Amino acid sequence: MLMQRVLACGFVAAILVSGCATPHPSQREPYMLAMRYDVEPRLVDVASGDVLTTVRRDFGVIHDLGFESVLLWHVEDVDRTAIMRIAQDEGLTVCVGDQTIEAYIDRGIIPGQFLSVRSMTRGIPSYVTDGVGFAAILVDPGSTLQSAGRASAVVTELRRWGMPWVVAGSRGMAGDIGGLATIASSEFVAGDEPAEARSAISLMLAQFHEHLQQGRNTGLLVDRFYRPPDQPQAVWHADGGLDPAQAAGIAAIVVRARQWGPRLSGLPVEPMPGAQTSDGNVRVSLMSDAKRCYVLVSSTDIAVAGGAVWFPETVADRGVDRAVEIPPVPSGGPGRVFRPRDGRVMLDVDLRFDHATLFEIVFRRNQPVSRVVESSQPVH
């Protein structure tokens, strides 16, 4: 275990104090920008004296890429405090699991000291939930319907208690992972040629847009920072280094996620009623609640370059005053404004495969629900 290796090298370890965690006021966290970090696989080949140095360097790289949180997998209870303290030192918060809950989800066993799932969730040690940099309990739904059902029961109790939580799977990222747009780094290995690098970035952006269209809008998760040399590529190469194309793609996605994510976080998604497009390979989604209303347009065809989208001037029984473009990067100029004409709203959009366009819908006699972000950069 990490802490044992650290102690063997003379480092001073923090004392872990057991106890029951105190309730947290809200289970809804701000939009999350997170990197998955597998502790033991990353450190299995690291010399004892380099353990803390390696973790600190890795977390510094993750922070420099623009992330705010790490999701920790394969970390022993005894190691959590040291890892969480390093994360805080590097400007990161931590989402971390509890071994008792992990065992219950995996095998369906409730330890004898607990009477129910409810009492088990209340028994999460305070050194986890009150630890430095703690952001949320990590819930892994596993790979079966049974384990996913048990994970759902855990989330229900965490939500009832008011404990922050996030759901993300460790056995492959396919399927519903609890609302996080997920970029699987192993799928986007670029070669040395510029065209291959651009292709990797394009695919990463397209996957991010696709997940937004699916309603995965509570955060961004990049899976993952490191894998052993005999496994698919991760962000950090086993021989020590970042793939430049992946780093560039991740940076582009992080900027876009920062710009759009907080606006869209938690909004339900549906196909835009009455929307029509100049090309059939285009998705138009409505994301709205009582206070916010956005339209997201993206392409599913790499050959599409540009076109138009239009929809009725009445959305959700309310008259549209204007559609205001939200640029994907924060800069100096205003987003374009489109007003209804002849009973419809016509949008001029860039429909290239790795591009998407977001519009805020402002209704008549209402103020905009969010400030228009200005941009002097080309809008994609």
Image (cartoon, grey):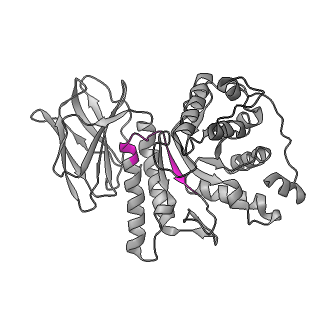
Nearer to me, 379 or 260? 260
Residue 40 in the figure: left or right of residue 330 = right
Vertical side of 105 occupied by 116: above or below: above
Vertical side of 192 occupied by 2: above or below: above
Asked if the magenta segment contains residue 217, the reply would be yes
Vertical side of 197 occupied by 34: above or below: above
Would residue 170 be visible to someone looking at this image? yes
Q: Residue at x 9, y 34 (%)?
A: 342
Residue 271 in the figure: left or right of residue 343 = right
Would residue 56 be visible to someone looking at this image? no
Which stretch is magenta? 211-224
Residue 224 position within the rendered picture, expressed as x and y whole percent measured from the top left: 57, 56
Residue 103 position within the rendered picture, expressed as x and y whole percent measured from the top left: 68, 40
> Where the N terminus falls, by quadrant?
bottom right
Residue 87 position within the rendered picture, expressed as x and y whole percent measured from the top left: 69, 49
Q: Residue at x 54, y 34 (%)?
A: 149
> Where the C terminus falls, by quadrant?
bottom left
> How many labels sit on residues?
0
Residue 145 position within the rendered picture, expressed as x and y whole percent measured from the top left: 51, 39
Q: What is the quadrant of residue 240 in the picture?
A: bottom right
Asked if the magenta segment contains residue 116, the reply would be no
Considering every residue shown, the one lying at the far left of the view is 342
